[in-house]
Structure formats: C-alpha cells, structure tokens
Image (cartoon, rainbow, N blue to C red):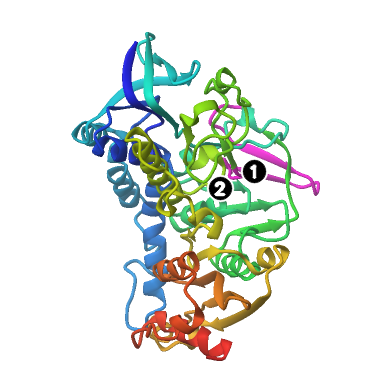
Amino acid sequence: MEVFDVIVIGAGPTGEVAAGRVAAAGLSTVIVESELAGGECSYWACMPSKALLRPVDLAGEVGRVTGLRLEGAGEGRPIDAAAVLARRDAVVSHYDDAGQARWLDSAGVTLVRGTGRLAGPRRVEVTTSDGGTRTLVANHAVVLATGSRPVIPPVAGLAAAEPWTNREATGVRAVPERLVVIGGGVVACEMAQAMRGLGAREVTMLVRGGELLTRMEPFAGEAVARSLAEQGVDIRTHESAEKVERPEPGGEVTVRLTSGGTITADEILVAAGRRSATGDLGLASVGLPESGPIEVDESMRATGVADGWLYAAGDVNGLALLTHMGKYQARVAADVIVARARGEADDRPGMRDRADRAGAPQVVFTDPQVCAVGRTEAQARAEGFDVRVVEYDMEQVAGGYLLGDGYRGRAKAVVDERRRVLLGVTFVAPGAAELLHAATIAVTAGVTLDDLWHAIPAYPTVGEVWLRLLEAYGL
C-alpha cells in the first residue's frame, strides 16, 4: 500500500486544479489518470473545438467590415482547412501529455497512469497501464474528478454505425463532404458551424424539438439557427433518426428519419448530451449508487459517506458540466480538504459553493456568440421571483455599429425587483463572450442596479450595452 494525504482520480482540468491546490498547501498528493493528463477539455473538447471555430468566427468578422477582403473570396473557400487542422494539432500538443505530466511533477503531484476505483473508505485500487495493480490509501481525502461521457441515444443501428462524438469531431483528420448532426445543443451548433465553415458541402442537423439551445433564452437559439441557415446548414426541427445503417466500415451512413425520409452522409455526429462518468468507480464499496451524478454538499463532499472524506468535483457531480465550473469546484473542495487536514474550521463563506447556485456562466462559440449567466426569465419565474425583464438590440450601441455592416445582437437582463439585483444576463452577438465576466460578477456578487449605474462603460465599446440596459430599466 502507498499512503498519500490526498488521492485524486481523474487528471482533467478539475482534477489537476484540486491536486495542485492541496499539494501547494503541503499535502502529499497523487493523481490517477487512465488517458491523457489534461483531460477532455485539453484534447477533445474546449481547446480543439475553439481552434476549429476561430477561423470561421474571424471570417465572419472580416466579412462584415467594408474595405476588407478575405483571401480567396469569390475564388473558392477563404479558409485553409488543412492549416486549421494543423493548428488544432498544435493546440492539443499533438495528443501528447508530456507537458501536463511535467507540470504535475513540478507542482509536487505524483502521477499514476491507470484506472482507479474505490475499494472501501479512503482506499483506491489502480489497474495500471501495464496490467499491474497498485493500492493507494488516503490519510485525509479522495477526490473524484472523472468528468462525463457522451450519450449515444438508443436509435436502431446507431452505435454499430461508429458515430462521431465530440472526440472524433474535434479530432477530425479530413473534413467530411456530408455530415449529419444529431442534437441541437452547444456541441451540435458549434461543430455544425465548424464543419460547414471548414468545407463540408452538406451539414444537416436533426433537432428533436423545435428550437436550438433550449436551456438558454429562446432568442439565443433563434439567432444561432438564423446564422447557421445563412451559412448553408440544413436545420430540421421536430425530426429524429429512426434507424442508422453503415454497411461497410468507413463507408456511407444512411439515416432513416421518423418523418419517413432518408439522408445519406459520410459521417454522423451524435451531440445529444453527456452523463457523469461514474459507472466504474467502485461507488458501491462506500455505499453510494453506482450510476448517476454523485450528490454533494456545498463543499463538494459526497453526501451519505461517513466521516466526510470523499469529494466529487466537476461533471461527475452533475451540477454544471462546464470546465470552468469544475475548476471552481476543485478550488472549493481543495480549500476545505486543506482546512480539515490542518484542524481549521471549514465552514467559512469562502469555502462554500456560491457560483453554482447563482448560475454558471456559459459561452457558445458560434457566430454569433451566445453567452449567459444566471437564470433565464422562465427559470426565474418558475422559482417564484418577482421578475422584470429588460432587453436591448446591441446593433444600436455605437460600439456594435462600428464593428461592421450587418452586426446584429441582443442583450437581456432578468431583474429581481424585490432586491433590485440581476438574476440572469444573456448576450447574443459576434464577440459577445468578452462581455460575460462583468455579468458574472454582477449576478454572483449580487451587485444592485443602483451600484451598477455608477460603473461607467467606455465609449464607443459594445460594453456600453450595460448603460442601455439600465436606461431601459428606468435608471
């Protein structure tokens, strides 16, 4: 048996932050990873997807500015897909995690490569990459940070047809001529736009409901749908796959639709959600259900586990399946672990999760970008708040007008009338993501509208929309 103060299972961004933070406090720390140190975000999700989307986003920006001309415009596609894919490879370090491993070592964290699972209180058994077994024991805490896995819907023939998930889409080696996308959420929208922008001749989205991005304000999905359609993406709402066939490995895919039609494509991407990766963690050995998100308290401690030694941060707890939220939760958990190890009080306000309750910030990196934090209007009303809504067309802001012809955008603020604070804010516009942190501060910190009125936005910037929203409210 090898004894450490803290054991972390999962070396993605969440696990790395937790491990690095407790190690920096002087606790001996080991992290277990079965794939690449750095995790999903670094190699198969956030980083490569944004590398693929950036040229498409920039092409849209340049196309709106009079006096600029994209190289190749009118003479073929202005984006060099091969060069974009090469840059993507550089962004993901050519799928080599040596740099991440060096960082862990420099942070004083021991990296064990293999699959870790609980084997009783404070005990983790690791099946190593060479087939051996190592037993690790924690003095203080075990942190589960195993992330999530894509959901493959139970459509006849779909799993056997070797569908793409986010991994195959972001790791694409050659852009397919024809792509079918199942889903209407973030991954579906981003990858549909990326593949179309990089040269796919036909991109068809099958959206079971009637809207895109259904967890956000309705106008967000409407704006993205309009943009995708303008770029040539075929969006079919109220449509689903009934059966999928790929007779030959690597050959054409035929998708039979519930409406009775068929689509033939080169690849099919499933972007129908994700679920917490808890299936093989040995949770039963500590009295927890083997499937589903791990329930946690406001310090990320797993509920129902005696002595409070088990923590779960990131996607695995199902609170907010976002990299930045996982890293935040890791900081919360790490600080509580360190305080308890030192015999200090661990119930101070700074050691409790506030952001998940206030609403996690999220960006959809399409063109236009969608960014939101906090509650939507529908969520706020359902929770019983006294709600007032203010909206503003962002093309009426001088900074937006200057960004180019055809610039379109919309901002929406959901106000708690009783406290005069923001419950949620949504921006939909090109480049809007950089507006989000101000909204996140306002929502999370509960800044009153009267105080926000004194935060003067610079002119002429798109950020002046904040003033316009307050004026629309009546201040």
Above or below for 422 versus 11: below
Residue closest to the eye, 229 or 277: 277
Of helix, strand and loop, which one carries label 1? Answer: strand
Q: The disc labelled 2 sits on which kind of residue?
A: Arg
Q: Label 1 belongs to which residue?
A: 264
Q: Label 2 belongs to which residue?
A: 178
Residue closest to the eye, 368 or 276: 276
Residue closest to the eye, 50 or 451: 451
- Please identify the quarter of the rendering in which residue 108 is found: top left
Q: The disc labelled 1 sits on which kind of residue?
A: Thr
Residue 91 on image: x %, y %: 30, 46
Numbered label tally: 2
Which portion, as a residue range, is magenta? 248-273
Asked if residue 459 lies left or right of residue 108, the reply is: right
Residue 466 on image: x %, y %: 46, 81
Q: Residues within 10 Å of mark 2 (few under 14, many from 20)?
A: many
Task: Residue 172: tell me if it is visible.
Answer: no
Which residue is at 59% across, 67% downward? 220
Does the segment drawn in magenta span residue 258?
Answer: yes
Q: Residues within 10 Å of mark 1 (few under 14, many from 20)?
A: some
Which residue is at 57% across, 34% downward? 303
Q: CA distance from mark 2 to mark 1?
A: 8 Å
Identify the mark nearer the N-term, 2 or 1: 2
Is the Cβ of the residue at disc 2 closer than 8 Å to that at disc 1? yes
Does the segment drawn in magenta span residue 391?
Answer: no
Above or below for 42 versus 408: above
Which residue is at 34% across, 70% downward? 70
Residue 272 on image: x %, y %: 62, 44
Above or below for 90 versus 450: above
Instruction: Pick the quarter of the image with the N terminus.
Output: top left
